[in-house]
Amino acid sequence: MAEPGPDVIWINGSFGVGKTSVARRIAELDARYVVLDPEPIGLALHRTQSEWAALADFQDIEDWRSTSSAAIESAVHDAERVVVPMTVVDPVVFDETVGELRRRGVSLRHVTLVAPIEVVRARPLARDGVENHWAKERVTGCVSALRAPEFAVHVDASSGSVD
């Protein structure tokens, strides 16, 4: 019998705060967890339809929210536990992903990694070795939005240490 704990750990936070690094570390420390990053789902959807390509953020695509939630729920059935590193700052998107999973009975713990804006801005922000200007432009808005009550389980990520 598995030890008690959430089926899903959703790691939220500003771009560049260390979500993916922490998610990978959790999976290294506890083999029951697999990392499921919903970003590739969004990027694929963003590229498939011209009306979606005009949107600035794939999270604005309703199909991304439902597909990501379904993929996470499916992964919980296939793997024992899932860790999701994903920035979500819009309360509606949060409800349609994290909230929807909870309504479906998925045991989910949501945490937000936080660090002072100057700490986050000092960190390199790149994907696959390419600087991510889109994300850099949104850091200040993310840090501000993540102060809202629905994102209030804060974990200090200012030290830079994944552990």
Image: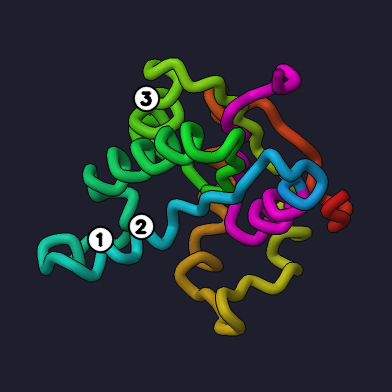
Residue 41, disc: 2
Q: Give the residue type at disc 3.
A: Glu
In this rendering, the answer to whether 67 lies above or below 126 is above
Mark 1 element type: helix
Per the rendered image, the range of residues in magenta is 1-25
Q: As shown in the figure, which amino acid type bears the numbered disc 2? A: Ile
| Res. 123 mark | none
Horizontal side of residue 136 vs 122, given as left or right: left
Asked if residue 24 is among those painted magenta in the image, a careful observer would answer yes
The foreground one among 161 and 90 is: 161
Tell me residue 34's x, y (percent): 61, 47
User: Which residue extends farthest bottom?
Assistant: 130
Q: Which mark is residue 100?
A: 3
User: Image height check: is 135 above or below 152?
Assistant: below
User: Residue tagged by mark 1?
Assistant: 45
Residue at image position (87%, 55%) is 161
